[in-house]
Amino acid sequence: MVDVLLIVFLITLFYMSIANRMRTYVKVLALQGFIMFFVVFFQLKEINTLNLIFIMLETIVFKSVAVPVFLDYLIKRNKITREAEPYLPNFVSLIITTFIVIVTILLSNSIIDPYLDKIFFVVALSTIFTGLYFIASRRKIITHVMGYLVIENGVFVLSLAVGNEMPMLVNLGIMLDIFASVLILGIFLNKIGDVFKDVDVDQLTSLKDY
């Protein structure tokens, strides 16, 4: 069951690579949050009530509800257009994402470690590198925020690649990191939205220090 969920998670990366609408990115991030909850739920051998509540808070409440609602608010607040406006065509993005997955599979096969769960490792690295690609290949600043959140999801999965147990401090660190990054970048987007009509990375070149 866990392998099926991880494959579905990997498919969401391919879907994001060919998606154009901003709302699609938000919905995919919400879906990834739900997938991660069920992955952790089935992966943990022993799970107590407190840990289950914390996992639900981090994945479903925060990643699947709070963050997507916040991103949707930013899109409306700054009147950002629906299109993500990538630098490269969707077909090229799909090829690059596929290449990233293939490379991570080859890399995982070259690592010999009995404690390493390779399918978690492949999905985690693919997610991290795909998030970096989204940041580099999208024009709008808010898509950079979404790419960073994809990277955070990859780090979350990577924490599961080395064992069946997920330490509470690792979960707390990831959640606080996401919260701080979204909050700071959200404030930044609001300020930029007051200056520019459309939040485009190219427009940052016209910023001057007076």
Image: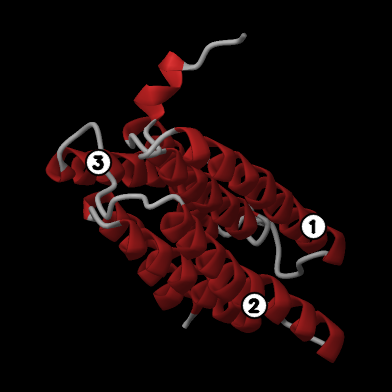
Q: Comparing marks 2 and 1, which lies closer to the viewer?
A: 2
Could you tell me residue 16's position as x and y percent? Answer: 31, 56
Labelled disc at residue 170: 1
Relative to residue 29, is residue 161 drawn left or right? right
Tag of residue 61? 2
Camera-nearest residue between 184 and 196: 196
In space, the residues marked 1 and 3 are separated at their CA atoms by 35 Å
The answer to which of marks 2 and 1 sits earlier in the sequence is: 2
In the image, taking residue 10 as reference, residue 64 lies left or right, namely right
Front tag of 1 and 3: 3
Q: Is residue 98 above or below residue 116?
A: above
- The Cα–Cα distance between marks 3 and 2, rounded to whole angstroms, is 29 Å
Q: Quadrant of residue 88?
A: top left
What is the basis of the colouring in this image? secondary structure
Q: Nearer the viewer, residue 181 or 38?
A: 181
Percent across and percent down for residue 103 are: 36, 38
Q: Earlier in the sequence, mark 1 or mark 3?
A: 3
For label 2, the SS is helix
Counting residues from the start of the chain, the first of labels 3 and 2 encountered is: 2
